[in-house]
Every structure is written in structure tokens, then in C-alpha cells.
Image (spheres, grey):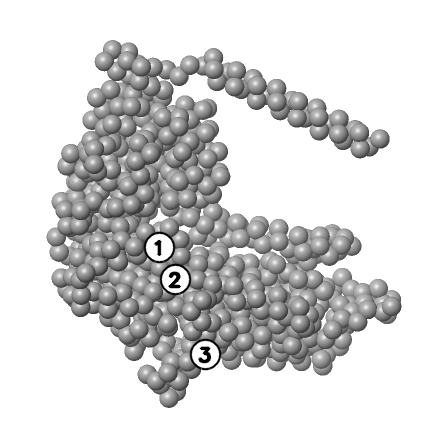
Amino acid sequence: MRKTTALRAAAAASAALLLATACNSQRGQDDKEAAADGACRGQQTTGITDKTIKLGGIYPLSGPASAYGAISDGVSTYFKHVNEKGGIDGRTVEFVVRDDGYQPPKAVEEARRLVEQEKVFAVFQTLGTPSTAAVWDYLNKRKVPQPFVATGASIWGTDDEHPWTTGWQPNYVAEARIYAKYLQEEKPKAKVAVLYQNDDFGKDLLGGFKEAVAGSGIKVVAEESYEVTDPSVSAQLTSLARSKADVLLDITTPKFGSQALAADAKNTKWNPLHIVNAVSASTTVLKPVGFKNVQGVVSATYFKDPADPQWADDAEMKTYKEALNKYAPDSDPANQLNAYGWAVASSLHKALDAMECPTREGLRDAVRNLKDVKVDMLLPGVTLSTGSDDAFPLETMQLMKFKGERWQLFGEPVDTRKEFGPPTK
Amino acid sequence: MSAVTEVLQQVVEGVGSGAVYASLALALVLIHRFTGIVNFAQGELAMISTYVAWQLVASGMPFWLALPVTLAVSFAGGMLIERLVIRPVQAAPELTTVIVTVGLFIFVNAMAGLIWSFTVKDFPQQFPDGGIDLAGVRVDWSTLGIIAVVAVVMGLLYLLFQHTSIGLMMRAVACNPASARLSGIRVGRVLMLGWGLAATVGAVSGVLVAPVLFLEPNMMGGVLIYAFAAATLGGFDSPVGAVVGGLLVGVAETLAGAYVDVIGADLKVGVPLVIILAVLLVRPQGLFGRAAVERA
């Protein structure tokens, strides 16, 4: 008897669900997406009017990667600042932020919500390679722009099946190349030991590095990987030390970055030139190790570090700090992630300004047709450039060395595309 | 560096990570001795205790004052968790308790992230930097320090188990709660005491390893797997076994990663799982454990 009741309840529940889905798809059909007329006839105008533009971002505001959530503070501060100055081409920006906790399935759920319920003009941004890869099929199928994703995987630029998705920051291959070029000039016979995270991120950067040094006097003499579940990388460092390499390329995420820097400092018998990748180059990684232990470590960057006193009188930096203090008083202006958010949002501002049609298609095309666009938060000499054969907006970086309590830039900005050609798949 | 010293250096590395695993394995063994359950949240409790110590030090308290305060807080916290979270499901099947501890794991991890964020914190190093050079093999002071503290804790636990009336009571409770209650032992209090002591030992473990692993909410997650392997290998009811097991697991894992090409660093994490499986198949009670005897 009890069994039949349960069965009946289940049947009723599934019937109700079916009905709900049916109603939903019905509504989807009735509710035609908005379209433009004139020269831009037939293009999608969802989420954009003469007065407003609606953008949606998906960031890890909770969970293990929640530190990156600070980027969304930088982005929303930028838009609030611009709105006060009259908006983007007269349009007020509405910026909706959703939390995926760095979990791809949640990112998919939030992307659907942003597109189908919030009806955003574009999904700006998704953060992290896994979350971005999880939503890009959906967004491209729906023809929703996904500009300037916050991840450095090279796939966003080498892929040609997803025209609505573009990267922004220099990809990991470009980053690997600037280290390769530096070594070719400074240590042309370098023996390199590599510590890398055993996933797409680590392999992307390591692969780019090996490709860039192929045929030169630089040799990768030892490689050790770690899993993100490993408690520590100190055993890997001991193995790498046996190679007696004179360069250590450290491709890690923050906690493991701290561990590797500490283990290298502790081993006084092995003193390689330590190159730490940009992902782990923030001062929040270096400070726990102790500044005295990380002197002379090398990395690369492309935007102005708000903690660097050389930008103290920089006009854009001043505007950024004032705006952040005003609109996000709990955020630390010296945090590089806030500045990153500001830089990427002002890059989007330039792309929106460049749209020929105020439509989703217009943004898609504008993002892929940027010609040496200057963004004030980026380093001097670093500009946004894309074209029909170039889907990587930023490929120029500058080296930096840790001195005292902060990074110091050195050398000239290096255009890695000019030096090495376009990244290959 | 000759091949022999290289191997020795790897062994020393292994002993270093093994001591880390052993320290958490001691807490696992302790709570298993007291209450008969396996506590999946043990690592997370150790992590949150470490955060308490970090917070105290960060707010200006000297480390050697912060340590006893942390241990006291952990002891009280462990007892409280037993009373509020575990006691209500005590009568339920063992699996229920295990699932409750898994839930506790997730809850504590998320809470630490909420309070202290997921960025890495620097924890003050209690041992001096550097180390000594033994015939070409470098041994860090921190490795020696961790081993010394773990040995002391192991000794204290051994004394507690074997030579005190409390130890006798808890052995009685773990062995047969019903008979223990009939002979006048306050079973509930003994269980609370077990949780409190295990949390304290866990806190020692967290404070010991934090300067090496760097403090963040997932600090102990990876360690827990190895600690389980250590406790299984040494025997879930033997403190000596936990320490020996921890050292063996650490050395085996490091040597396998460095010298067995098929394993390399990629498959290193598989080593503790293989150990767990092999021990359960060949000698389920572990090296130093006593086989459970059921009355027919």
C-alpha cells in the first residue's frame, strides 16, 4: 500500500515537472529575442538599449578560489565610476555578478540564468579555465558574446569553433615565451628544472616553454609535476635539486607557489634562478615565504601594479584608487586583482565604444578587430590588438624582479607574437 | 653528491613528510581507541585549531602563550562537538557516524574559508631556519623538531593508554560500552574526553605542519589521506604503529616518486592507496594492531 502511494507521488511530481518544462519552452517561443533594424538589421539587441546595457559576470565569490572574486570588485567599481561620468556612449551599465564557487556545473547554471532570465547583453566575464570551458559551448550556441575571459589558457585564441569567446590576459604560451627569450639573452646555455601543476594550465605553459626553447642551447633537464591534492611539493623540489639545473621554472598556483619558493630558499646548496609564473607572482604568495627569501625571483606582468610606488602619481592609478575607496571601501586598492578588474573593464569599455552596431554581433566583431588600443591601466607599451588571424588581445609582457618588498620592472616590454609568431594549437 | 647520499637525502625528505602524516595519524588512532569510530573531520579540526593559533599570534599574542590557549580551545571544542554533533547519532549504525564526520569535514572547511578566506597565511616557524649536514645529507631543524614533538606525543599517549585509570576506562568503553556502563564508567564523559584529546593532538599536528605546508583551509585535506594510510599500516589502535606507519608511508612515497619511473610524481598520490589496500588484504589489523576478537 505504502509503495503505491510513493509511486503515485513520484508520478504526480514528474507530471508537474513535465508541465513546468512545457510551459517554459512555450514561453521561450513566445518571447522573441529583440532584433535591430537599419544597417544592423536582424542583429541581436537583447540587453542593450539607447540608455542601458546589461552585463553579467560569473566569479568564484566563495570556495577555494574566492580570492579571485576581488576581480569583480574592480570591474564593478569601474562601471560605477563610468556611470557617474555619463555611462558608455550614453548607456548606463548594469553589471550583475553571480557566484559559481569555481565549480563548472554551477557556472553553467549561472550562465543560463544570466542569459535566459537576466537577459544580459554579454557574459563578461567568466573566471578560470574549467568554468569558462564549461559554458562556452552554451554561450556560442546562443550567440551570446563572452569577451575577455579571466583565464590565460591559449585555447581561447587558437580555437576557431567559438567566435563569441575571446581571452584577454596574455596566454600561458605567451608568458612561457617571454621567459624563454629572457633566458636566451641572459643564460643561453641554461639548464632548466621545471615544477608544474599536472593539469591544462601547467601543461600549456610548459609546452609553450619547450616549444620556445627548441633548437636553442637551453635544455629542460628535469621535470616534476604535482597534483592539486598533494599536501606539499617539497619532495619534488628535492628531486629537481638533484638535476643541478641553474634555472627553476615554477609553474604553480598560489599555495604551491609559496611552498616551492620556501623549499628553494631552504636548500642553500642549490641556488637556481627562480622564475615564478604570473599566477603565483602576487605579493600574497611571496609575503608568507618572507621577503628576504624571495629576493631576485623573476616573473612577468602586463598591467600596472597598484602597490608599485612608481605609479603613485599616474593619473589612471589615482582615479582607480579614488573610485575603489568610494565604491568598494572594503577592498584593498593595493590588491593586484582589483587593478586587474579595473583594467579588463576599461578594455571592454574600449571594445563597446568601437562597436559599429550596438548589437551582440557588433561586440563580437569589435572584440576581434582591436588595433593597438591603449588602455591606461596596462603597462606603457602594452596595447590590445586583435584581427582576423589573431584572437589574442594581449601578447606583450614585461619582466620583473623581486627587490626589497616589491616587484621591479626591468627590460623593455616584449611582443611575444612578433618574436615567436602566433601560438599554435 | 654520490648515489648513496642522494638516496639518503630522499629518505630524509620522506621521513620529514612521514612525520607530518604521523602527527595527524596519532589523532586518528586516539579517537578510534576511545570511541571506535574513524573521524574524517580530524584533519579539518586540526586546520581550524591552527587558524585559532594564527589568529592569536596575528593579534599580538606571543607564540608560546598562544599555543596552550589554542590547545585548550581545541580540547573544549572537541568535547563540544562530541556532545552536540556525535552524541545524537551515537545509537545509529557506524556508517551514520562516519557520514556525520564527513559532513563535519565539509562544514568546517567552508567555515574556515568564510572566516579567514582561502589566501595563504604565513604561520610563525617555531624551529630555527637551516639544518645540519650529516655526511652530505641535509637535515632541516624543522624536520627534527617535528619528529621530536611527534615522539613526545606518542610517548604520552602510550602512557595514557597503558598506565592510567583513565586509559583503562576508555579501553573498556571502546571494547564494550554496555559492560563499561554497568561497571560504573560514565561512558558519555569518556567519549567526550576522547574527542577533546584527539582535537588537542590534532591541533599540535596542525601547528607543527603549518609553517611547512602554509596555512589555508585545504591544508590538511591531502595530509588526511596519508594519515589514513599510516594508521591503517601501523594499526588503528596503536600510537607506536601510527608513527611507524607514517614514517614508512612518507619514505615509500618519496622513494617511489623519485626512483620508480612508472610512478614518478604523477602517481605518487596512489602510493598510500595501494598501501591501504595491501594492508587490508594481508593484515587487516595493521603492523602493530591487535585483531578484533568477536565473542561468538
- Disc 3: host chain: B
Say if mark 1 contacts mark 2, CB within 8 Å: yes
Q: Residue B58 in the image: state x and y as whole percent.
A: 42, 61
Q: Residue A54 in the image: state x and y as whole percent.
A: 35, 25
Say if mark 3 contacts mark 1, CB within 8 Å: no
Q: Is residue A417 above or below residue B272?
A: above
The reply to the same-chain question for discs 3 and 1 is no
Q: CA distance from mark 3 to mark 1?
A: 28 Å
Which residue is rendered at x = 35% and y = 55% of the image? A202
SS state under label 1: helix
Left or right: A17 as drawn, with respect to A209 = right
A346 or A423, which is in the foreground? Answer: A423
SS state under label 3: helix
Q: Residue A350 in the image: state x and y as whole percent.
A: 21, 31
Q: CA distance from mark 1 to mark 2?
A: 9 Å
Which residue is rendered at x = 28% and y = 28% of the image? A364
The reply to the same-chain question for discs 1 and 2 is yes
Q: Quadrant of residue A370?
A: top left
B148 or A1, which is in the foreground? Answer: A1
**What count of labels does the image hold?**
3
Question: Which residue was labeled with disc 3?
Answer: B11
Which residue is rendered at x = 62% and y = 53% of the image? B102
Question: Which residue was labeled with disc 2?
Answer: A225
Q: Residues within 10 Å of mark 1 (few under 14, many from 20)?
A: many
Q: Is residue A87 visible?
A: no
Left or right: B35 as drawn, with respect to A50 = right
Q: Residue A2 in the image: state x and y as whole percent.
A: 82, 32
Quadrant for the C terminus of chain A, please. Answer: top left
Quadrant for the N terminus of chain A, please. Answer: top right
Q: Which mark is residue A202?
A: 1
